[in-house]
Amino acid sequence: MKRTHHCNELRPEHAGHTVTLAGWVHSRRDLGGVLFIDIRDREGRIQTVFDPSDLSPEICNSAASLHSESVIEVVGRVRQRPQGTENPKIATGQVEVLVQGFTVLNHADVLPFPVDDPEVANKVNEELRLKHRYLDLRRPEMARNLRLRSKVATATRVFLDEQGFLEVETPTLFKSTPEGAREFLVPSRVHPGQFYALPQSPQQFKQILMVAGVERYFQLARCYRDEDLRADRQPEFTQVDIEMSFIEREDLYSLIEGLLKRVWKTALGIDLPTPFKRISFEEALNRYGIDKPDSRFGMELVDLTESFRASSFKVFSGAIQNGGVVKAINAKGLACATQGQIETMTEYAKSFGAKGLAFIKVEGGEWKSPIVKFFSDAEKAALKSRLAIEEGDLILFAADQWLNACEILGKIRLYCADVLKAQGKLTLDPQRFDFMWVIEFPLLSFDKEMNRWYSSHHPFTAPVAEDIPLLKSDPKKVRGQHYDVVVNGVELGGGSIRIHQPAVQKTIFEEILQIPAEETQLRFGYMLEAFRYGAPPHGGIALGFDRMIAILCGTTSIRDVIAFPKTAKGACLMTDSPSAVSAKQLRDLHIEVKAARKD
Ligand code: ASP
């Protein structure tokens, strides 16, 4: 096939040229016997004209009978479109191709949904789109996402290569290391009863690569987590996985800032300002009620503990006496919140164990609230000035232990922002990207039910050096050398400086995380051993690649940037997987299925 041009290329200067184009029938119009067919290929679209005065009746009939998305090749002459018929919406809108000859390369059946309608994503059930993903991916919006993904992958590789990184592939048939998310297991045929696990991340291999002297490693790594899926999760996803030796946190920050600067410039032409701001975990919680703040709008949490310490409103003073705090946010302009919206917010508070949600609506010059009558004049004055209360405001309170109070208001703050956005009272510039590093996370968190400590990030994260003496005496105070990179309220990635001394790592496993010595040996023995033979200090990070592409494409769903994603139930609707396997396959794998269920 001798295609001379792509469908996006022709311009008025090509007028008079004879060209050969190949692609799909995007759309068709019949104007009094003259047939206009827009042909689309990967690069774009162009109008072709089938004029019965130039062509045989067979050709005209054959063209007229084509369904959308049939594959054709046309030979024709480029000409300037007659005045008034130009289409400014497409790059080739000044010209058209007068068809001289044409071949049907393949007929398409009637489509399950139209490919040429830009509103398809809103009109057509996503399951239908996923079942016929090859059609969905033909839509220019999806094709653009795939292209951008490829461009960003290349930019990432080029940048990291320039910085001296080696791309190393690590195994996807790994060993089960149950911690964090549930794993996908792969039965071994040659080792009856034994299983590989698909890696949740290449964490251990990349650390071993540092022991192996690689110094700078990266990989666009496929990772697997068998979790109940939420809107923005997939059972398999891609991370830009990075590890470096002989570094400190600062080195990592500047590397990632440089990488993201390159990516944003390549993908969107935007110059990201660097360095990114930094905020401690504690400050993030105090001000935004979340460890991945969206700082594009205010509505920050205000601490009112001192103002209500001696309040006669017992819900507040009682919480403070129990070691808690009183915090509030001012959702400006939301005094109009409906009963239903207040109930939704109350449910958030209750999901954190609060009994209810205290609020004040400022309407008609009045503070409308069942609790205001309990406040003294001094308390009211403090509220008014600390929260800058004005007509139309909605004040929401949380009185609880510090973390709970912060998290309740953090959730409510985001909900209020969504309501304000829907009402047109809050507009966020889609070209604005508020990057920040969230740092100084606690190394350990306490699991009340299990009555033990667990790693806030993962067990390989190094404690801040000066906090190491507190590990056994006051674990809660130990800060980890962990960092997250956050943009517009989305955690784009996270990593840490790692423990490289085998003795410290063993203490963390056995004494702090209380993993029995034999289990530590079984699960991590090879790592502890490797560390005894000269492990350099090292650290790294993983960036969520799908999430990054979704942000760059301006979509909220990572399914829109993955060629063949799974549904929320982990199914691929196109290939119909997962699927049952034959009795012989199961026998070979020494597997017996007790209950085969098909939902
Ligand atoms: N392996 C970690 C993760 O997947 C990232 C890292 O610490 O580099 O979250």
Image: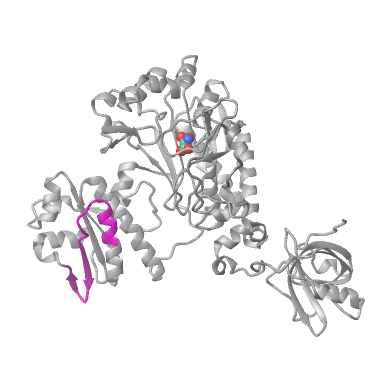
Residue found 57% across the figure and 34% down from its top: 172
Q: Nearer the viewer, residue 473 or 385?
A: 473
Q: Nearer the viewer, residue 44 or 125?
A: 125
Which region is colored magenta?
345-369
Magenta stretch encompasses residue 300: no
In the rendered view, does 151 fall on the left or right side of 404? right
Q: Nearer the viewer, residue 76 or 248?
A: 76
Residue found 40% across the figure and 66% down from its top: 421
Looking at the picture, how far across and down is residue 381, in whole percent?
14, 62
Task: Name, please, the residue furthest toward the bottom.
Answer: 32
Looking at the picture, how far across and down is residue 442, in whole percent?
32, 36
Residue 190 occupies which quadrant of the picture? top right
Q: Does residue 238 lie above or below 206 as drawn?
A: below
Magenta stretch encompasses residue 367: yes
Q: Nearer the viewer, residue 187 or 133?
A: 187
Residue 347 occupies which quadrant of the picture? bottom left
Chosen colour scheme: one colour
Residue found 64% across the figure and 60% down from its top: 136
Q: Does residue 496 lie above or below 71 as drawn?
A: above
Q: Is residue 82 visible?
A: yes
In the rendered view, does 368 fall on the left or right side of 249? left
- How many numbered badges does the structure rendering display? 0
Quadrant of image for the N terminus:
bottom right
Looking at the picture, how far across and down is residue 203, in whole percent?
49, 31
Looking at the picture, how far across and down is residue 83, in whole percent?
78, 80
Q: Is residue 299 visible?
A: no
